[in-house]
Every structure is written in structure tokens, then in C-alpha cells.
Amino acid sequence: MTEAQLAQRAQGIVRIFNEAGVLVAADVHVATRVCSLGGETSEEVMLAAALAVRAVRSGSVCLDLRRMRDVSVDNATEDELTSLPWPEPSEIVAALRLSPLVIGGNAGPLRPLRLVDTDDGELLYLDRYFLQEQTIRRVLDERASTWPPADLKAVRTRLDSLFVDENGPTTSPDRQRIAAALATTQWTTVIAGGPGTGKTHTVARILALLSEELGLNARIGLAAPTGKGRSTSARVRT
């Protein structure tokens, strides 16, 4: 933990977690400021808010309160992390259900936290990310309710030309061909698989299918989060 990662004015339980490296200064500052603006004094709520910020910083849109102890910290052992004064999830949930940061309060309409009940337990969102997730969900639901116009006979012919088994006919399903067929006949498709399973090969043929189907109306955008991903995108384009 460097000096820059320590919140100098942190107090109470968030300071302990900050000094242990579970929280960084940004997590603590956001949580303490939000609690101050909302008139929240509960340490359980402040810790939950800081952990929710940490979750977003770590790549998740929410904090699974059942698994909030599942954290890893550089230079900290599992025993050291386990020995921290973790509140019970039920205590945090009870505090959140009464918190003005969740239900609103006299300090104003500020409700930056969203507690969501699921069949598997409670999730805590920063409200902005909950709204963004719901927007994406709504768009995907709308896209799933209709299908693009497609000449299925023509699609089958193009699939036959693009997916040729060099080893001859086989009884095993060609999952790459199936993925390409689905991508051509629905608005949204997710292609997933481990290294070497042919994702790039499949995407290139999907683009070929769509280009033939749409012609000059085809609009293709490629985005990648890493340098390796950009290299893969370049191979797809060629």
C-alpha cells in the first residue's frame, strides 16, 4: 500500500480496510463523500458503498454481498484478509434497507445506491451502473423480439460455400457453422470459446455472410480492448 493509496482522513472500519489494501483512497473518498451528502452515519453502509466502488474499479457492475469477502490483495495472505472485521452480510443488508442512500431521506433526493434482491441473494449497485445495465437489458430484449429479414435458402447456400469440411462429411455438429447461421438470422449474437476454438475464423465468415446479404448497406465496426485484440481484428478485416 503506497502513500497515495491511503485516505488520510479515513476513519473507522473503512480506514482499517484501506490500510489492509482492500480499499484504495478513491474507494474511501467516494463512499465517505456520498455518506456525508446523504446523511448516512452507518459504518456498515459506508463499507458497503466503498466495496461497491471497488467492485466497479475491478470490472464488475455490482457487489455481490454474499461474496464480499472474496477479495485478493497484493502482499496480503488469506489469513490476514479473513481476520479483518468483516460485518455479516445480513448486518449490511439490514443497514442498507434503512439507509437514506437506498430509500431516500431528509437530506434530499440523493439515492446513489441500489439494493437489488435476487433469488441467489442481494446485489449492491451504484445507481448509475444499475440504470446502465437496465438500459442494455431493455435494448437486448427489444432486439430479441424481432428477427432480421433473411433469405434462408440463400443463407444455407452461402454457409455451404464458406464452411467446407476438408475431411469430408461428419456426424458431429459444426458449431462454427451453427454460430454463423444464428448470427445471420438474429440481431444480436455472442461468440464465445477458449483459445484455438476458431472464434476469429467464425467471425470472419460471419462478416462475409453479412456482406453478401446486405451488400453496400453493411456497416461493420470492430472494437478491441487490447493490443492483441486489435491484431486479431486486423486479421478479421483481411
Image (tube, rainbow, N blue to C red):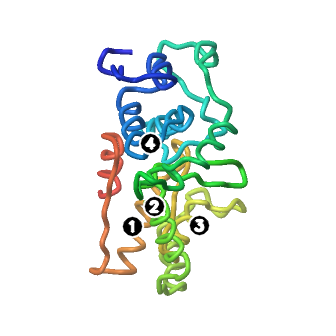
User: What amino acid is found at the position of numbered circle 2 in the picture?
Assistant: Leu
Q: Are marks 1 and 4 in contact (CB under 8 Å)?
A: no
- In this view, the residue farthest toward the front is 106
Q: Earlier in the sequence, mark 2 or mark 1?
A: 2
Q: Earlier in the sequence, mark 4 or mark 3?
A: 4
Residue 51 appears in the figure? yes
**Nearer to us: label 2 or label 1:** 2
**Residue located at (67% from left, 36% from top):** 91
User: What amino acid is found at the position of numbered circle 4 in the picture?
Assistant: Val
Residue placed most toward the observer, 161 or 4: 4
Secondary-structure class at tag 2: helix
The answer to whether 95 is drawn above or below residue 148 in the figure is: above
Q: Which mark is residue 178?
A: 3
Mark 2 burial class by Cα count in 10 Å: few <14, some 14-19, many 20+: few
- State which quadrant residue 194 falls in: top right
User: What amino acid is found at the position of numbered circle 1 in the picture?
Assistant: Leu
Q: Earlier in the sequence, mark 1 or mark 3?
A: 3
Q: Are marks 4 and 3 in contact (CB under 8 Å)?
A: no
Spatial CA distance of label 1 from label 3 is 14 Å
User: What amino acid is found at the position of numbered circle 3 in the picture?
Assistant: Ile
**Residue located at (50% from left, 77% from top):** 142
Query: Which residue is under mark 2?
Result: 131
Spatial CA distance of label 1 from label 4 is 33 Å
